[in-house]
Image (cartoon, helix red, strand yellow):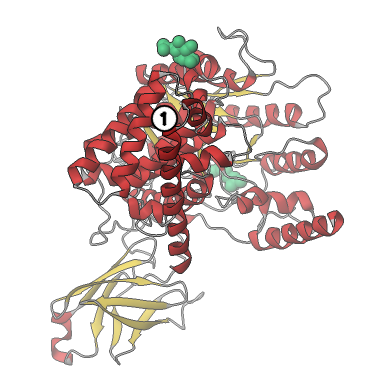
Amino acid sequence: MRLVHGRLTLLVQSVLLAHAEVGALEKQSFERLSHGLACNLHSKHWQWYHTAYKDAAEAAAAGGPAHGKAAARCALAEALLERTSNLSDILNCNVGVVAGYYLLARLVLPVAVESFGTVGADEGEAGLAYRLLQLALVFIFTLRNANRIPEAPGVAWGVSERFIIPTLMRMRKGQVRKAQKWLQHAVPIAPEFRDRSLQIAVVSICAYPANHPLALPSVTPPNRDAYTSRHGYHLRLHLEPPILGAHGLGLQHAKLATVLAYLQSGKFDWVAWFDCDSIIMNMNRTLDSIIYQYAQQVPEEISGSVAEPPLPVCGAHNVRPDLSGQWLDSWVPPDLRQDALVSIYQTFEGRVVASSPQFGEAPGVVGEDESVELEFDGSALRGRIILDAEDTPHTVPVRLEWDNGAIWSRLGTPRSLEGAPCREPCVEPGPDCAAELDPKMNLLITEEGWGLSSANWLIRRSAWSMEFLHAALTAAHVQMRLFGDQDAIILHLMNEDALRAVCSGDDVAFTSDPLSRHASVIPQFELNAYDALNALTMECDTFVEGDLLITFPQCKDAEGCNDVFNLAAAYASDLDKSLGPRAGAWWSRAEGPPRWSRYSATSAPAIRIFGPRPLVQELFFRERLLEQHGAG
Ligand SMILES: *[C@@H]1O[C@H](CO)[C@@H](O)[C@H](O)[C@H]1NC(C)=O
Ligand SMILES: *[C@@H]1O[C@H](CO)[C@@H](O)[C@H](O)[C@H]1NC(C)=O
């Protein structure tokens, strides 16, 4: 906490400093102000924006009336919406735009943003601030300054990438937690699920010049071919830059144009875009299963309540002992115990609620170390979980021994044993499957620390999707040439919704994710699992056997990467490997030691693909040390 406090003071100081500077400069020449802010104040639009920014910053600093703050906040959001409607103009005041998003994030959720995401963002409740910071980051990229805001204008506006990037990274963890909760309540879909009525296309561009040293143009096409022919998907793989109505497009932007063209063709219900450097690793995993899992209609807004956790999915792998079931309390006289049973519900991530007539409800949590803690009227009671000694591999809890001397013994068979109630996942649409597609869900996409990823995603044929791709393409190709397709996608999925939510002024809007309801951010591992090295350095999901694919961010040189690509392709085409039933299902996915028979812990490419994380960490740090020594 002290650290946070120190940084906070620094932040406040820099904002005050910025204002002092601006104030002093206002008396001096206009040129110098314009120059100091790196903002073209000769344009009345930017002058107006700057004024809105100053007013909002002053409202934030002063402890004035709430309505004054709300008005200033909304005026800045509106100014930003107007300013971002002409992307070509942003370069005339780029740092100011970044500062605007950052200030709005602070204004809607001051504690979460000023604590760098350490307070009030753990359960994904910083949705709006998180998206505003993601938008700020998009415009840090357009500065083309190695993800840094130039020092002088940064100070003048009171913003730094150091306030934004670490905060985003931390807030994302809360967003992930919230999504996991959602997933538990969704109808589980088996990894082999097929809906034969869906026409699905897989689209990739592997356009490399002839004799390019990278192995991808020879590795990826057969990999895609094997996968699509196995499931009857349509493969549209381009070995040359496509000219589908998109003349003169850079390869970057050709992605959006190509997918758009395939949606417009009307032949496919869903199109999957996969970057050429993503390699399909689990040939059995279907795209239908991902579509049905994440584009399904979920009844109501799912509350974060742990009172009614869903039954586990059959075959779910639990890291923690499962306490769900009924327990007899030793403190209750024997003849009354049956009437005073304690019931425990436990969720996937180890939260529990114990309830009984004698104490009502007590929430708590189960640790991975066989500990349990319950909260009774604000005070915590800790206990130990005693596992069944007869059971191999000792996973069944039979007794709970509490620090206050109470002992609870299990009544009956735990649900994790055979015959216990669990939810069977759907394997195909039909009367046995309660999952129905949400007609408004059009885009399934993943995100990592830097925001939504355009590497691999799924999009449904619909008017919304075509309009969206067209708008994103125009943004990147016409209005803001510095935009990658990723930036354009982010802008068009959240800018307007986020800025409007700022003006709505209600607490629900401030904590919810303003992302367009046509799109869903799905777990990164489902469509975008990173190789073990990148997963470690970028703090995100690493490839685990069973995952659909693996992707290699920044693997660009043949010397270091070809062996890795080739090994991934060899793994993919090894049909004798056994992944076990339902491999790749979210409910049984866990990082662990690699299981492939051809894995070798002495092979660099194998470690890069399969990890395990601790080994990668060791090697990576050793390598870094060597580099430093070499350099020194
Ligand atoms: C957008 O900004 C550019 C660059 O400042 C400017 O030339 C253009 O006229 C603006 N477009 C509109 C519609 O205002
Ligand atoms: C893929 O599915 C087939 C048929 O269900 C099964 O025999 C095979 O073992 C699976 N492959 C892997 C790698 O799990």
Is residue 592 toward the left or the right of residue 63 in the image? right
Q: Amino acid at mark 1?
A: Leu
Which structural element holds mark 1?
Answer: strand
Q: Is ligand 1 within 8 Å of the beta carbon of the residue shown at mark 1? A: no
Q: Position of residue 198 (x, y in %)?
A: 42, 25
* Vertical side of 403 occupied by 10: above or below: above
Closer-to-camera residue (322/210): 210
Corner quadrant of residue 435: top left
Corner quadrant of residue 43: top left
* Vertical side of 375 occupied by 307: above or below: above
* Vertical side of 50 occupied by 467: above or below: above
Q: Position of residue 533 (x, y in %)?
A: 67, 51
Closer-to-camera residue (297/7): 7
Q: Position of residue 495 (x, y in %)?
A: 38, 30
Q: Name the quarter where the N terminus is drawn.
A: bottom left
Mark 1 highlights which residue? 443
Q: How many marks?
A: 1
* Vertical side of 324 occupied by 278: above or below: above
Q: Name the quarter where the C terminus is drawn.
A: bottom right
Query: Which residue is depicted at the point 35% across and 71% down?
Result: 365
Closer-to-camera residue (4/422): 4
Ligand 2: quadrant of the figure:
top right
| Residue 193 appears in view | no
- Mark 1 is surrounded, within 10 Å at the Cα level, by few (under 14), some (14 to 19) or many (20 or more) other residues, namely many
Q: Position of residue 49 (x, y in %)?
A: 37, 28
| Residue 436 appears in view | yes
